[in-house]
Amino acid sequence: MMAAVQGDIPLLDAEMPAANGVATARGLARMYGAIANGGEIDGIRFLSPEIVAGLAGRRSLKRDRNIMVPLSFHLGYHGVPFGNVMPGFGHVGMGGSFGWADPASGLAFSFVHNRLLSPFLVLDHSGVATLGNLLRVGVGKARKHGFRPVSEFGAPFSEPGAVAG
C-alpha cells in the first residue's frame, strides 16, 4: 500500500483489475462522455445505446460491505441512491479519483489525483458529490449563456517506458 501512496511507477504499470485503474482525467472524462451521450463522442460510436442504457442499473439503499454506506453498484458503476444529489452513475476510486456520467443531461466529468489522499476511504470520497454539483451548476450556466470550448486544456503527461503514462 505504501508504494501506491508514494506513486510507485511499477505498481501503477501492473494490471490488477478492480484494484489500480490508471488514467488521465481527460481520458477518463472522454470515456464517461461517450457513456453520457448514448455511447458516442466526437462522432465515434464506442457503445450501442442499448448497452449504455444497461449500465445505469437500479438505485437502492443497500449498504456497501466495504465502506459501510449505501451505494448502488451495478456492473462496476455506482450511483447515489437517494434523491437528486448526483444524477447519473460512475465510479469513485480509493484515492478519491472518479469518473461520472449523467446521460439525462449529457454531462460527464472526471477528477484524477496524482496521489492517495487518505487512509480513510469515506474521506477520500467526500468531495465527489460537492464537486459534481458545482460542475453541474457551472455547465448549466454555460449552456444557458453560451460557452467557448477550450481544446487541449491542460498539459499532457508521459513517463518514458511507463505503460500508463
Image (spheres, rainbow, N blue to C red):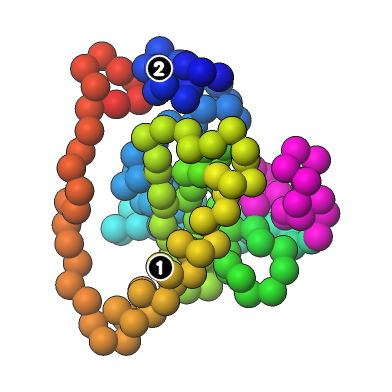
Q: In x, y percent, where is residue 42? A: 29, 58
Q: Residue at label 1?
A: 135
Question: Can residue 39 be spotted in the picture?
Answer: no
Q: In x, y percent, where is residue 91? A: 57, 47
The local secondary structure at tag 2 comes to loop
Is residue 76 a member of the stretch shown in magenta?
yes
Q: How many circles with numbers are drawn on the protein? A: 2
5 relative to 104, above or below? above
Amino acid type, mark 2: Asp
Identified at 22% across, 27% down, the residue is 158
149 relative to 65, above or below? below
Q: Quadrant of residue 41?
A: bottom left
Is residue 162 a member of the stretch shown in magenta?
no
Q: Residue at label 2?
A: 8
Identified at 49% across, 69% down, the residue is 133
Question: Can residue 108 be spotted in the picture?
Answer: yes
Towards the viewer: 101 or 115: 115
The dominant secondary structure in magenta is loop
